[in-house]
Image (spheres, coloured by chain):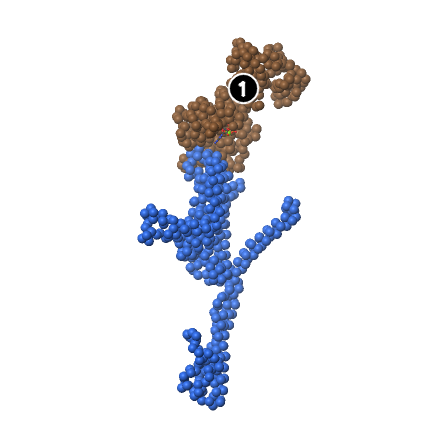
Amino acid sequence: MGEMARFYGRFLTGLILALVAFWFLALILMPQISMIQRAFHYEARDGAAAQAVLEANRLQQRVATMNFDIRALEREVAAGVSGAAPAAPSPSNPFAGLPSPGAPRPGLPTPGLTPSPGGASAEAPEARLERLRAERDGLTETIAESRATAQRLRAEEAAAQGWSLRNFTLMSPLHWRIFGLTLVYALCVTALSFLVCYPIAYAAAQAKTPRRTALLLLALTIPYALNELLRIFAWTMILANQGLLNHALDALGIIDLSQGGAIRWLASNGSVFLVMVYTYMLFMVFPIYGSLETLDRNQIEAARDLGASSWRIHWRVALPHARPGVAVGAIMTFMLAVGSLSVPQLVGPGLHPDWFSQIVNRNFFESNSWNVGSAQALLLLVSCTIFIFLVMRVFRVGIREIAR
Amino acid sequence: MQGQEVALERLGMRFGEFTAVEPTDLTIKAGEFFSILGPSGCGKTTILRMVSGFQSPSEGRVLIGGQDMTALPPNKRPTALIFQTLALFPLMTIWENVAFGLEAQGVPKARRRKRAEELLDLVALGGQEDKRPSQLSGGQRQRVAVARALAVEPAVLLLDEPLSALDLKLRQHMRAELKTIQRRTGVTFIYITHDQGEALAMSDRVAVMRAGRVEQVGPTEEIYNRPATSFAATFVGENNLFRGRTAGAEGGLVEVETPFGLLRGQNADSLGSGEEAMLFIRPERLAPARPEHDLRLRAQVERADLEGPFFNLHLRAGDQRILLQLPNEGATPPEGEMELGFSSRDARVLRAGALAHG
Ligand SMILES: Nc1ncnc2c1ncn2[C@@H]1O[C@H](COP(=O)(O)OP(=O)(O)OP(=O)(O)O)[C@@H](O)[C@H]1O
Ligand SMILES: [Mg+2]
């Protein structure tokens, strides 16, 4: 650090260190910790306990209104007024006389008994009082029960709340399947990307003239001047039912668009793979290019001079040399593919099942279940880490050899 | 393994406007150790790449063993190239390197391994089979490259300055090794170098090249003792040069009018009189004047460098620098002014032309 201070001066060094600290703490450590913490923190939402409490409270309110009605009736009976006269609307229900604004909710008994205006011949106040009292007692019992249940449930929930694996264990089998499939898909994308990018990187690295290398790499880079979403969207225009591809096939007479013979390219995993390979190509091409560029062309010529076929030259000389680049490219492409949201979203609407990244996204931003989303994101993180170690293991031989 | 003859017929190479190799006729005999000697950029590598097939010539033909190879790719020719950078495969073990050509031919592993061991024994590297190139010394790597090239049983081995990366001691050692390997295998070696000492020490015959053109071809002693051009005379070994104009020729000798008076030497270019000429005399043919010397000079000793068996005596006569090799016989070297002499039979008069340095 002292060396750094001497090199950049005190102010710059301080600035650099502060920025690094900010980057590490605010952009890496904190989100990561928060994610992990959420992932292992179960949060009951719309739980049964809350529902029970809500129900009990509602019943409690009804009991209160009933009490009011009962008291009114008691006074009536005590005054000796026999129920001949239609009473003014019950105080508990000032709107009783009005037409009800909506259908009464089914299953819920209307609170209080609305004396119908024309129902003078209805039951006697004593009988009504009797009935209301009975009803109230029943309700009070139900409330007690409800409260007890709520308490029990809440205790249970409180026990489950907090640190637990429930965010993982409660994930549906479908989601687990999607998770597994997404990993497989990402592996496919990585492999495809390698197959496409290795020849390109080789051509660029071993081009006869530096001009040709520059042209090739420029041609690869230009599409990246476009926003990623636009780049993907360009593909959807090609692959759409009424897109370029189907029109071209139509023009060639292979399909007949007017007869509705459009081939459905979008919303297939093939298209998603294709677009992903295209979108993340540079991340595979450049590392491979970088390592192939250091390959002494004489080695290739020597191999050819010794009679090796092109295939053997690649397998025995060029590819082993490019292994570190391939490893880096594979890691980057895999991580991008596993986490890619825009490609499956734009290319595969209606694709079933979704990619895992879409599910994570939905949990975060649609159903607002951050904790479940965190758990799923953590799964992705863990699988990426495992993938990195696997790749390192597979390619470590190469890295060691190169170090030698 | 049996060496084959290599013949270049009007073989030339142009890169656009630039002529890297002028049309050249050259025959390299079967089983010969042949060197192509020339300064950097004179077109040596280009010739080698045309013989090996990595470069198709812009004109002329390459014949190996009497067969036209001009249109064949490198792997179809009975040649093996050893690169200036060696180009060993760093990720393979030594024996895999050596056996790579056999692997390409589909030879089973056990046989490959056995053959690799034999070849490594041949180049005195037995027991190093399972190391990697980076674990070997420069000279050992050099020999691995030779073994790898020999594994495909080439009729012609092409070596592009393979020793240039080694230090002097090792280079001298490897000269002898390569020579031995060549003798033992009987393969035709075409050896490229810009080091005239290397070419003289190893070769049967040498071609001296300058700027895309072969200036002289001949056995080593002829190249050294009877250089054909002023370039060859100055590029191969040390030489003292006296410029002048020919005065008269008689009986294979020619007189040259120089600032030091009339000197005389072998009339190698059959010069007439009044022509621009250069008279060359090797430092070891100069000596303090003795009675048998028919030519004499006076010069001032500037410096005497001890080279072990002899002194390099640097002298000056006016603007002329003179180098003289004096055997070290135990006495201190002379100082001050001295009289030098040489015999006109040892001097060589050539038409004035380009020199190797300046
Ligand atoms: N592919 C090429 N394109 C254009 N010019 C070239 C090419 N290859 C070689 N040259 C030119 O041809 C000339 C001879 O090159 P070459 O490699 O044969 O020299 P060399 O004698 O092997 O030199 P060195 O001793 O430095 O290896 C050089 O001037 C070089 O610049
Ligand atoms: Mg060269």
Identified at 50% across, 61% down, the residue is A371
Give the image location of residue B194, x and y in percent.
Answer: 53, 26
Residue A381 seen anywhere in this rendered image of the structure: yes
Q: In the image, is residue B69 above or below residue B130? A: above
Corner quadrant of residue A125 = bottom left
Chain B colour as displayed: brown
**What amino acid is found at the position of numbered circle 1 in the picture?**
Gly
Q: Is residue B226 above or below residue A52?
A: above
Nearer to the camera, A152 or B347: B347
Crowd around label 1: few <14 · some 14–19 · many ≥20 (10 Å): few
Q: Going by the picture, which residue comes out furthest to the bottom?
A: A80
Q: Quadrant of residue B238?
A: top right
Residue that mark 1 sits on: B353
Residue depicted at x 48% and y 73%: A55
Assign the C terminus of chain B to one quadrant of the image: top right
Residue furthest out toward the top:
B250
Camera-nearest residue between B14 and A226: A226
Residue A310 on image: x %, y %: 42, 37
Picture coordinates of residue A24 (x, y %)? 57, 53
Location of the N terminus of chain B (image quadrant) = top left
Can residue B4 be seen here? The reply is no
Write the residue at 48% across / 67% down.
A46
Identify the element where label 1 is drawn.
loop
Residue B77 percent across, percent down from the top left: 41, 30
Chain A tint as drawn: blue
Of residues B209 and B331, the one drawn nearer to the viewer in this rendering = B209
